[in-house]
Amino acid sequence: MNCRELCDRFDDRLRIADYADIDASADGLQVGPEDTEVEHVAVAVDAAVETIERAREVDADLLVVHHGLFWGDGIDRVTGESYRRLAPLLADDLPLYAAHLPLDGHQDLGNAAGLADVLDLSNRAPFGELGEEYIGQRGRMPSMTVDELEERLATELDTGGQPIQTLDFGPEEISEVAIVTGSGTDWIEEAAAKGADALVTGEGKQAAYHRAKELDLTLVLAGHYATETFGVRALAGLAEEWGLETTFIDHPTGF
C-alpha cells in the first residue's frame, strides 16, 4: 500500500484534523517520503533511538508511534538526540507517523478504550473534555476493592517492573471509573463531577494528592507507558486488516 494512502486512512479513522487546535503534537506523517510502498508496519509508543533502530532491524516500511518527534515548537537545529533520532529515519527513507491525543481519545481504537477493555467497563461514554473533544472514557466495571483493581492492572499491564500507585480516597468498593491515560490528573474534578469512584491514569503530580483527597476520589497511577500501548496495537490491527505485516516494538520505561 502507498504510504500516503495508508496515512490518510489512519488520519481519517482517528479524526486527526479535529484535534489539530488542541494537540501540541504534529499528528500525522511527521517524517519520510509519502510515495514509498508499505508492506510492513512497526508500531511503538515512543519515537526514540531504540524504537527507531528496532524498526529498521525488522525491515519495517513505516513506524507508527503515539509520541512522535515534533510538538509544534518548530525546529531550530538538528543536533544531539534530535539528530540521532532523525538520521536513521532519513538514511533508510523510513517514514514516521504519530498520533497523540486522537489515539488517546478514540472511543474504539484509543488508549482509554483499551484500558476500559481490561477493566470490563460497560455503559461507556466519552470522558476527559479538552476543547470540543475528549481524550478518555468512563463507565461501570464489576465492583471490586482497590486491592483487586490494583491486581487486575498489575496483571494486565506492562509496568516495567514498577508497582501500581494508588491514592485510596474513594469508597471501599469501586464500580464507576473514569480513564485518561498517560498524564491525566488534570481531569480529577471532572471525574468527581461525573460520579466516578476512581480515576485511572498513568502518572501523577504533587497537587493531585490533595485534589483527589478533598473530592473523595481514588486515584490510580498505573504508569504512563503501561496505559498507552493499546492505541498503537489497535492501529497495528487495522494495518493487518488491510493486508499488511506488523510488528509491535515493546520498550517499557517504568514511568
Image (cartoon, rainbow, N blue to C red):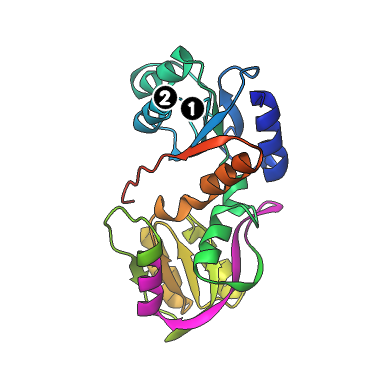
The residue that disc 2 covers is: 56
Q: What stretch is highlighted in magenta?
A: 127-153
Residue 45 quadrant:
top left
Q: Which of 43 and 14 is in front in this view?
A: 43
Q: Where is residue 73 in the image (x, y as percent from the top left)?
A: 52, 28
118 w.r.t. 102: above or below: below
Residue 220 quadrant:
bottom left
Residue 71 at least partly seen: no
Q: Where is residue 103 in the image (x, y as percent from the top left)?
A: 59, 47
Reply yes or no: does residue 136 show up in magenta.
yes
Q: Is the magenta stretch mostly helix, strand or loop?
A: strand
Answer few, some or many: residues within 10 Å of disc 1's Cα (few below 14, many 20 plus, some between 14 and 19): many
96 w.r.t. 128: above or below: above
Q: Nearer the viewer, residue 63 or 24?
A: 63
Residue type indicated by callout 2: Arg
Left or right placement of residue 183 versus residue 162 in this view:
right
Left or right placement of residue 208 versus residue 178 in this view:
left
Q: Position of residue 183 (x, y in %)?
A: 46, 53
Reply yes or no: does residue 200 show up in magenta.
no
The residue that disc 1 covers is: 60
